[in-house]
Image (tube, helix red, strand yellow):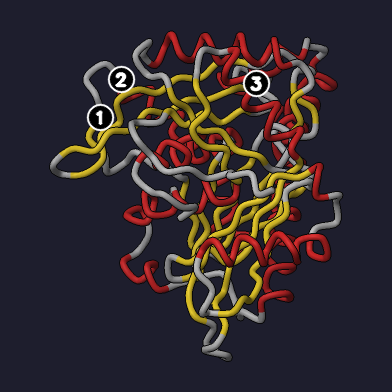
Amino acid sequence: MLKNLWKKKTSLVVGIDIGSHSAKAVLINQGTEGYVLEAIATELMPRGAIIDREIQDIEAVGKVIAKLRNKITASATQAAAAVSGQTVITKVIYMDVSLNEQELASQIEIEADSLIPYPLDEVSLDFEPLDVNESDPTKINVLLSAARTESVEARVSALEAGGFTTKVVDVESYAVSRSYDLVLPLLPDDAVDKTVAIVDIGAMMTLFSVTHAGEHLYSRDQMFGGEQYTRSIVSYYNKSFEEAEAAKVSRDLPPNYTFEVLAPFHTVLVQQIRRAIQMFLTSSGKDKIDYLVISGGCAQVEGIHELLNEELGIHTVIANPFSHMAVSSSINEQELNQTASQYMVAAGLALRSFSTWHI
């Protein structure tokens, strides 16, 4: 039986990015002149509550989400979260163009057993018809997405524990790609027709996602994140993990930290992104990445913008999905501009209020 990951919208949805280091929430409305950022919040996640993108302690995560709800607004009752990692599978498959949606669902359910490397009773499936196949007009391209049901249900339970009704469980790479339109104004005018990579660097994982002319092409997770930088600070300066995190954000570190911890982290970061780009180019047949957008907590690490411009030779910008939005008077805009890059996933999830499907 198909279990919907995507559902139709009926009211505003709070986008909640549940990460291993923190949970972030965004509430977006739609005004007469475009989107309006109504509320934004972040809360630290207890260490160990989430490991390798999987929720280990639903009660602890639920308490964090409840704090987010109190910061956002008590009147917001519906939320969207996302699954990610190795247990999430997306594929474009080809089906008979004459099938209606019900027939398509039945046919996909029959064929899913050979497409998904997990027992079907352990996964949640959904699909979206895309467009007619260019090579064979008798076929339609269909996006099939699958996630381990336990991952989906854990997020639903955590949101419910935090006081929300789950409206959508999305796929993280789609949420990031949905935010692409929000950061497009930060890029040169021709970016709308170019190949743009979004590199979302979290605490433990980096999501590399590519869009061409507004169409999501590719995504891949890598085991790399800002926690490596934090651990270097812990090791070099005999700090606790919490002290190291605070020092990383405030840059309250000894003068020689630039050579001892920052430069080595920069080197590894460039290697990771260069490798991700090469894997994409090899698999896609594309010649190059035209523009690079950096998001996530690590986007604020000192010198990253200049480093990537220089080392990769690709025009790079730091993401701010709210740069061209009206902002509620209750939000501190100076603080928002300093942290906006962290909210790409949450902003993409919040946009599910206005779109039925993934993009």
Identify residue for label 1.
327
**Residue at x 50%, y 33% (from the top left corner):** 80
Mark in front: 3 vs 1: 3
Mark on residue 331?
2
Viewer-nearest residue: 16 or 10:
10
The amino acid marked with disc number 2 is: Ile
Q: Are marks 2 and 1 in contact (CB under 8 Å)?
A: yes
Q: Quadrant of the C terminus?
A: bottom left
Q: Quick one: SS at disc 1?
A: strand
Q: What separation in Å lies between label 3 and label 1 (alpha carbons)?
A: 31 Å
Badge 3 or badge 1: first in the primary sequence: 3
Label 2 to label 1, Cα distance in Å? 7 Å
Residue 59, placed above or below residue 230? above
Marks 3/1 in contact by CB < 8 Å: the verdict is: no
Q: What residue is disc 3 on?
A: 157
The secondary structure type at the circle numbered 3 is helix
- Examine the rendering and report whether any part of residue 17 can be seen: yes
- Classify residue 35 as left or right of residue 50: left
Closest to the camera, between mark 3 and mark 2, is: 3
